[in-house]
Every structure is written in structure tokens, then in C-alpha cells.
Image: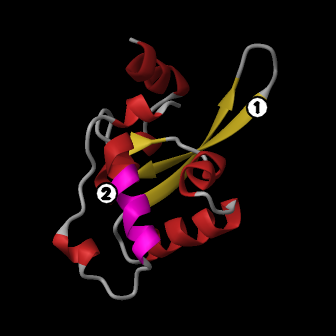
């Protein structure tokens, strides 16, 4: 995933901006998530990707994402994909709303693939 995939801007709503329970970098992470979610309403960036971007640890990113989710600013779901060669891969998606998370839960592997490559 390249930084170009994020689009030109992210969004920081006032409810997130003025939430004193959030660390400043968690707010910046939210902005990055909104930029990555622009195309589909969700993103699949890994903790490693964010850790490299923010020059921190994956554990810290995990805490920030959990805090954002606990506050209701985003939601995560894990989808399991089975490939023809027998491999299984779990992918974490970050969604900007519970509605997009519910819609994503209902999509098949083929539906998601066609959205990204079709």
C-alpha cells in the first residue's frame, strides 16, 4: 500500500478533534484511516504499515486503533480468506462506521476482490 493510495487528504471531525481522551497521534492516525477509507469505506492497512508511517511500534498502533474503536470512531472486522492453493489468510479491515462494517461482513471473498481489482 503506497501513500498515494490514501488520496490527497483525510478528515478530522470535530468530535474526534476535541476528544480529550484521545492522544494527538491517535487523532492523526484517524486522519490517515479516513484517507485510506476514501475509496471503499474501509481500509486494510496493517499495524506494521501504520507503525512505519508514524515511527512507532505495532503495539502502540494497536492501542490507538482500539481506543478509536472503543470511542466509536471506527470499527474493525477480521475476514478469513481461503485460496485455491490451500492457504488461509486473515485480513483486518478498519471501517469508518458500523454500517460499513456490517456491509463488509456480508461480502464474499470474490465480492471484495472484484471491488479492489474490478
Q: Which residue is mark 2?
A: 97
Q: Which mark is residue 45?
A: none
The residue at the far left in this view is 14
**Secondary element at tag 2:** loop
For the residue labelled by badge 1, is the local secondary structure a helix, a strand or a loop? strand
The residues tagged by marks 2 and 1 sit, at their Cα atoms, a distance apart of 27 Å
Mark 2 touching mark 1, by CB under 8 A?
no
Q: Residue at x 44, y 42 (%)?
A: 43
The part of the image, by quadrant, that contains residue 21 is bottom left
Q: Position of residue 50 (x, y in %)?
A: 56, 51
Of marks 2 and 1, which one's residue comes earlier in the chain?
A: 1
Q: Position of residue 114 (x, y in %)?
A: 43, 16
Q: Per the image, is 83 magenta?
A: no
The vertical placement of 85 against 20, above or below, is above
Q: Residues within 10 Å of mark 2 (few under 14, many from 20)?
A: some
Q: Which residues are magenta?
A: 24-32
Image coords of residue 73 (percent x, y): 34, 67
Quickly name the residue at label 1: 88
Whole-percent x, y for residue 19 in the image: 30, 83
Amino acid at each position: 500500500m503506497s501513500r498515494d493510495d490514501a488520496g490527497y487528504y483525510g478528515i478530522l471531525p470535530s468530535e474526534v478533534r476535541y476528544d480529550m481522551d484521545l492522544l494527538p497521534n491517535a487523532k492523526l492516525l484517524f486522519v490517515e484511516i479516513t484517507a485510506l477509507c476514501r475509496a471503499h469505506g474501509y481500509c486494510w492497512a496493517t499495524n506494521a504499515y501504520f507503525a512505519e508511517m508514524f515511527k512507532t511500534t505495532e503495539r502502540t498502533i494497536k492501542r490507538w486503533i482500539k481506543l478509536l474503536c472503543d470511542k466509536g470512531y471506527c470499527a474493525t472486522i477480521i475476514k478469513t480468506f481461503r485460496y485455491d492453493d490451500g492457504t488461509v489468510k486473515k485480513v483486518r479491515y478498519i471501517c469508518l462506521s458500523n454500517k460499513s462494517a456490517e456491509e463488509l461482513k456480508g461480502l464474499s471473498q470474490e465480492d471484495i476482490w472484484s471491488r479492489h481489482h474490478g
